[in-house]
Amino acid sequence: MLLTLVGCQADTSPTSENSVPRARELVDLRSRILGYTAKFRADSPYAPPGKAQRARLAKAVGSLLSGDVQEAERQLAPLGLGLTRLTDTDSGRRYDEIAATGTGESTRWGRLYLNADSAVRWNVQVPHPVSDRDTEALGIRLLEQNPGGALVLAGTHRRAGEDDAADVAHREDSAFHTVVVELQKRGVPGVQLHGFTDSSDRPYDAVVSTGAVETAPAEVAAMADRMDNDGLRVCRAWAARCPLEGTTNVQGRSAQREHAGFVHVELARHARADDGRDTEEAADALAGLVTAWKSSSPSWG
């Protein structure tokens, strides 16, 4: 999977060459990311990074979050990953992206995008792009419309490879998990997006949980209430027995260990697709959550 970083250089001097990636591109950010995920297939090969590779990736992400771009680039290069400063042609906003530079295994490790115009205060995680249809588009929307965030994106279909190796929400040996943990170590809260299909045992539009934690902070309860007030049927896992609660999610468990905020959100397709009847309401509620995090969480960068 490949990672893309946004926002961690906001507190460094804009004139410092050490704070700006050497590679720079003018892009349509949404098209760039969706063009990447459009190639995902369930029958694709996939091999996770090894232990030493994950350690190097963690060091690279940590360096980037600390503003040491040159060290991040040095650590990324042997992994087949690179760091690029992107300027979005639509908004003019800048993002730093970690992504594969070639055609090797790292192309399926995922991407990380960080808002380069402000410090990182929250992140949105998309562990099952394409498989959980349209979660990648919703993640991009949150990133583009709400400053101060990062997008952590898995790099292949969840059924790629063998023995659920690419199901990164339940595997700790992935680039996706490595990046999320580095954010959690710095106290950066995250919301993880999932999707479900309609069935008789899921009479909801949204299922909201806090993973391994059985209580919900005020901003998470407020998000669920906002969805409810806007007409979505919401199951709150801290107050009721819900399907798809995410209690076995490994990023939720690591968030508990690192004392970082984590929210697991399952959405019906009509609450996450671009043309869904409830997508605007769901997106607005999620935006309210990350705005609350931006106001209260420490900055990194």
Image (cartoon, rainbow, N blue to C red):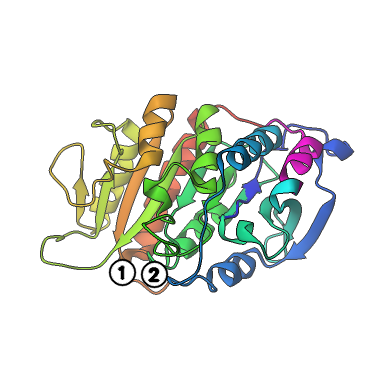
Q: Is residue 148 left or right of residue 191?
A: right
Q: Is residue 278 left or right of residue 148?
A: left
Q: Residue at horizontal 30%, vertical 54%?
A: 266
Residue 113 placement (x, y as % from top left) = 62, 51
Which type of secondary structure does the marked residue at label 1 adopt? helix
Residue denoted by label 1: 270
Contact, mark 2 vs mark 1 (Cβ under 8 Å): yes
Which residue type does callout 2 highlight? Ala
Task: Say which of 270 and 183 sits in front.
Answer: 183
Residue 99 placement (x, y as % from top left) = 66, 55
CA gap between label 2 and label 1 equals: 6 Å
Q: Residue at horizontal 50%, vertical 47%?
A: 174
Q: Is residue 134 above or below residue 83?
A: below
Q: Residue at horizontal 13%, vertical 44%?
A: 241
Quadrant including the N terminus: bottom right
Q: Is residue 291 left or right of residue 29?
A: left
Which type of secondary structure does the marked residue at label 2 adopt? loop
Q: Is residue 91 above or below residue 188?
A: below
Residue denoted by label 2: 273
**Residue range highlighted in magenta:** 66-77
Magenta run includes residue 131: no
